Image (cartoon, helix red, strand yellow):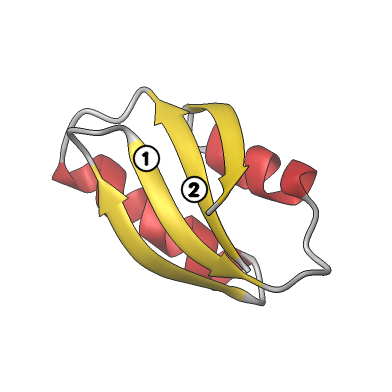
């Protein structure tokens, strides 16, 4: 399933790198398609059994705010 994570607080390439790492390395079943720094979002493929709360916790662990999760 494709989802878009609307994220507030990303400011630089290191933010993108950290977000990519936490999503792909810490959560089995997530593949990052694109992280758009200017747009403030990350598009991912995610297994159906992964709850949005797991994604939210991972993003907010880095100090960002997950504003919305959309199915795309």
Location of residue 39 in the rendering, given as x and y in whole percent from the top left corner: 25, 33
* Numbered mark located on residue 41 in the image: 1
Quick check: 63 left or right of 61? left
Quick check: 25 left or right of 57? left
Location of residue 12 in the rendering, given as x and y in whole percent from the top left corner: 16, 36
**Up/down of 51 relative to 26, above or below:** above
How busy is the neighbourhood of tag 2: few (under 14 within 10 Å), some, or many (20 plus)? some
In the current view of this chain or complex, which residue is farthest to the front? 72
Residue drawn 36% across the image and 68% down it: 33
Residue drawn 21% across the image and 45% down it: 14
Quick check: 33 left or right of 14? right
Reading the image, the residue beneath label 2 is 4
Quick check: 35 left or right of 51? left
* Numbered mark located on residue 15 in the image: none
Residue drawn 52% across the image and 54% down it: 72
**Up/down of 48 relative to 53, above or below:** below
Helix, strand or loop for disc 1: strand
Quadrant of the rendering where the N terminus is positioned: bottom right
Q: Are marks 1 and 2 in contact (CB under 8 Å)?
A: yes
Residue drawn 68% across the image and 40% down it: 57
Location of residue 50 in the rendering, given as x and y in whole percent from the top left corner: 78, 62
How far is the residue under mark 1 from the one under mark 2?
7 Å
């Amino acid at each position: 399933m494709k989802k878009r994570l609307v994220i507030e607080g990303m400011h630089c390439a290191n933010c993108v790198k950290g977000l990519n790492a936490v999503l792909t390395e810490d959560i089995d079943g997530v593949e990052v398609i694109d992280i758009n720094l200017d747009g403030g979002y990350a598009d991912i493929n995610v297994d159906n059994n992964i709850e949005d709360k797991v994604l939210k916790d991972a993003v907010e662990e880095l100090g960002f705010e997950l504003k919305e999760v959309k199915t795309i």
